[in-house]
Structures are given as structure tokens and as C-alpha cells.
Image: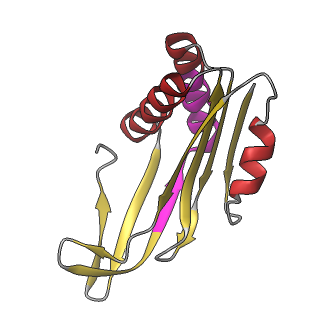
Amino acid sequence: MIDIKITEDILNITDCLAAARDLESGGVATFIGTVRNITGNKPVTRLEYECYRPMAVKEIRKIIQQAISLFSVRNIVVHHRIGILFPGDAAVIIVVNAGHRDAVFDACHYVIDTIKEKVPIWKKEIFEDGEEWVSAHP
């Protein structure tokens, strides 16, 4: 099962866990990426995420399909927020489940790293004294 959502709405881990629920799976891994209040020595007041939604969904679907194939996991949920976010807000939630723990950890790690590398979602950090677009690559 694949569930992808790109939204301006607040992300909800309970919804993500419910979407991925599978009684045949014994392992569940989650990743929640949140907005930090500082980058380097600069206080962050907010982030602004933009994306080209059709391409972002298409690329996330490819990444999920690759993860399912590579790690033999059963279900992957990826919900990513766009728009204006503040420190503490969840920017992305990933839930992976499968029969065993190693596969879900590896798949979750692969999904977030590959999303950051390949998906057209752009982040601008807003500071008290300016702003800058951040490279998508970790």
C-alpha cells in the first residue's frame, strides 16, 4: 500500500499510522521531520515550502516503489507539508511497515534521503535578518 499526501494542512502521525496499519506486519518505523528554530547560529522564524505537486507525487511514488522492492516492506506512507511552517511543526512524516524491524528502518532511511535528493520540494528559511533558499540535498 502506498499513501502520498502533499498538503498545506497540519500533519498528523495518528492518521499516518492508521493508513499504514497492517496486522500482518510486525515492524513499524516512523520518521517525523520537524522545523528547527536555529540553523547554524541564526534563529529561524519560519520556513516556506514550495513544490511542483504533480512531479513531486510522481517522484515520491517512484521512491516508495523502489523501497518496497529493495527492502521487501509492505506499506509506506509519506505526508509532506508545504506552505508556511514554524519551529516545531512537522514538515514530513514517513511510516513504513513490514514483517521485520531491519527492513522498516532501512526503508524509512532510504525514503527520506531519496526524497531530499530527488523530489522537487523547495525550502526557504526565514531569519530575523533575512532569508535563503536551502539546497534540497542533505
Furthest-bottom residue in this view? 128
Q: Nearest the camera: 66 or 24?
A: 24
Furthest-left residue in this view? 41
Residue 89 shown left or right of residue 37 in the figure: right
10 versus 129 height, above or below = above
Query: Which quadrant does the C terminus fall into?
Result: top left
Magenta residue check for 11:
no
Task: Give me the residue at 48% from left, 67% from top.
Answer: 48
Task: Give me the residue at 17% from left, 78% from top.
Answer: 41
- Total residue callouts: 0
Query: Which quadrant does the N terminus fall into?
Result: top right
What x and y, as percent, mark residue 132? 28, 68
What x and y, as percent, mark residue 82? 58, 59
What x and y, as percent, mark residue 121? 48, 48
Task: Give me the residue at 43% from left, 34% from top.
Answer: 109
38 versus 95 height, above or below = below
Q: Nearest the camera: 98 or 83?
A: 98
Residue 1 shown left or right of residue 129 in the figure: right
Residue 113 shown left or right of residue 25 in the figure: left
Magenta range: 48-64
Task: Give me the residue at 36% from left, 36% from top.
Answer: 117
119 versus 104 height, above or below = below
What x and y, as percent, mark residue 111? 48, 32
The rendered magenta stretch, by its main secondary structure, is classed as: helix
Magenta residue check for 59:
yes
